[in-house]
């Protein structure tokens, strides 16, 4: 089993920023693992603008932002990139097991940075009553299906939650000729950036129902309709306010959950509510030498902030490694 | 004197901008935290424009969809019509970030450019 100075799990904006910063701070042996077949992480499917206004003083799309960071990472020979590499096990003494096509590898890391991002909250997690037909997608999955696979998930869409991903997809579906019937948000205010309310919802006259929720989903094999109902301040249904909306697709955009099962299994102290590592300082976990950055540390709204904070993780890892000598 | 309220979309801050109008003439702009907001506000009430970011289908390439955008904003009212044009495009050869795949797209001087790099 090989020992590496620094292993980074995830080559999205967080992992890549950590890798380049670690190198700038003196780390000369870096293994950068990425489960997908290309670098860039979630940026590859974020084809909309809104990236780079801090870092590059330009307004870029996700893939353009990624291209610039990727160019930097690829130019550093001390960063070994391993694609199609899926981390499956991590121990408290920093032994990481990962799968590559046709093989299983184990590596002992002196320092480790987890940049594994988030997964999406699903319909089941928010307990929407009704049947379980096809046509219910987390908004980010719908984004991947359209932007990467070239598939249109549906034609008449209801969006649950006003998180940014749902707002962005309201516009995306409209662009692709679908009818977005409405966005339903349980709280009184939008969860996403106000610019997205303007450029994704108001621009297209899409109704937004605040203080409303989906009471029930109808449909045998495919979504057919939803019941929408107004709620009070305790999120209880207000009787008499229910109305039906016919649709064939439901997008769920109600928040992200950091993917931290590996560090949890390794023994890091976890915050049960957020699934983030318990931490007194940015990017640190309860295990010295294991760091987390980007969405896996805490959920971010803006990619530029991810790059800024993840560079700190790279620096911390470098400091930690110097301390070991 | 009337007041128009808009929200700037130039950056994630989303400043609430107020335009003091006197018979369709802008007398004062306030609420913006940077000069881009003032420019946006003036443009938004006269002729709102948006950058179109979308994806085009590929043929015979190692990817199915290629991310693209207009390199300058186009009139907001033209967005849906622009999408109908985009959906007719097929990418059939390797292209790089920044490369133009449709010039004078919807408006002279506005090009549809590649935003995703696959070949470096």
Image (cartoon, rainbow, N blue to C red):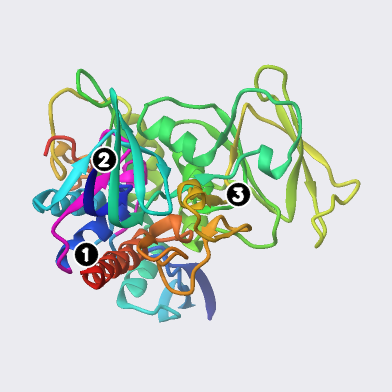
Q: Callout 3: residue from which chain?
A: A
Q: Are marks 3 and 2 on the same chain?
A: no
On the picture, is A104 further left or further right than A286?
left
Determine contact: label 3, label 2, CB under 8 Å: no
Task: Tell me whether the residue at label 3 lies in contact with that at label 1, contact meaning CB atoms closer than 8 angstroms.
Answer: no
Of the two numbered discs 3 and 1 on the same chain, state the one appearing first in sequence: 1
User: What distance separates the C-alpha of mark 3 from that of mark 1?
Assistant: 32 Å
Q: Which residues are magenta?
A: A25-51
Where does the image place residue A302, in percent across and percent down from the top left?
Answer: 40, 61
Instruction: Say whether residue A31 is magenta.
Output: yes
Give how far across and how far down residue B6 sits, in percent: 49, 68
- The reply to whether the magenta stretch includes residue B113 is no
User: Which mark is on residue A21?
Assistant: 1
Element type at marker 1? helix
Residue receiving disc 3 = A254
Callout 2 secondary element: strand
Query: The disc numbered 1 marks a residue on which chain?
Result: A
- Which residue lies under the disc numbered 2? B68
Pinpoint residue B35: horizontal percent, then vertical percent: 31, 77
């Amino acid at each position: 089993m090989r020992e590496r100075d620094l292993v980074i799990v995830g080559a999205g904006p967080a992992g890549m920023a950590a890798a380049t910063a670690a190198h700038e701070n003196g780390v000369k042996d870096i293994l950068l693992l990425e489960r997908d077949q290309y670098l860039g992480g979630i940026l590859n499917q974020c084809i909309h603008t809104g990236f780079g206004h801090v870092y590059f003083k330009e307004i870029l799309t996700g893939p353009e932002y990624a291209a610039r960071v990727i160019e930097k990472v690829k130019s550093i020979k001390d960063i070994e990139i391993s694609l199609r590499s899926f981390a499956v096990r991590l121990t408290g003494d920093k032994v990481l097991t990962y799968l590559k096509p046709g093989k299983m590898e184990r590596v002992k890391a002196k320092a480790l940075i987890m940049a594994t991002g988030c997964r999406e909250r699903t319909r089941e997690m928010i307990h929407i009553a009704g049947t379980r037909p096809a046509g219910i997608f987390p908004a980010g999955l719908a984004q991947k299906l359209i932007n990467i696979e070239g598939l249109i998930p549906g034609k008449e869409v209801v969006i649950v939650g006003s998180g940014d991903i749902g707002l962005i997809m309201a516009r995306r579906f409209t662009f692709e000729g679908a009818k977005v019937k409405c966005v339903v948000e349980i709280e009184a205010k939008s969860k996403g950036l106000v610019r997205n309310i303007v450029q994704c919802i108001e621009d297209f006259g899409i109704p937004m129902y605040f203080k409303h929720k989906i009471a029930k989903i109808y449909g045998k094999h495919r979504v057919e309709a939803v019941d929408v109902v107004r709620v009070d301040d305790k999120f209880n249904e207000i009787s008499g306010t229910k109305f039906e909306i016919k649709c064939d697709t439901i997008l769920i955009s109600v928040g992200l959950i950091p993917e931290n099962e590996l560090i949890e299994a390794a023994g890091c102290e976890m915050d049960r509510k957020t699934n983030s590592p318990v931490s007194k300082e940015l990017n640190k976990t309860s295990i010295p030498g294991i760091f987390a950055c980007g969405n896996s540390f805490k959920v971010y709204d803006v990619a530029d902030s991810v790059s800024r904070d993840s560079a700190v993780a790279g620096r911390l890892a470098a400091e930690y490694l110097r301390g070991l000598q | 004197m009337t007041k128009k309220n808009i929200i700037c979309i130039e950056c994630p801050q989303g400043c609430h901008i107020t335009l003091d109008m006197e018979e369709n003439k802008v007398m004062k702009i306030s609420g913006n935290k940077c000069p881009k907001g003032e420019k946006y506000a003036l443009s938004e009430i006269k002729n709102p424009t948006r950058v179109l970011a979308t994806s085009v289908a590929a043929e015979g390439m190692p990817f199915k969809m290629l991310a693209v955008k207009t390199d300058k904003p186009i009139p907001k009212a033209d967005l849906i019509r622009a999408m109908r044009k985009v959906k007719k495009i097929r990418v059939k050869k390797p292209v790089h970030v920044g490369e133009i795949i449709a010039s004078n797209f919807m408006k002279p001087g506005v090009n549809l450019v590649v935003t995703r790099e696959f070949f470096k």
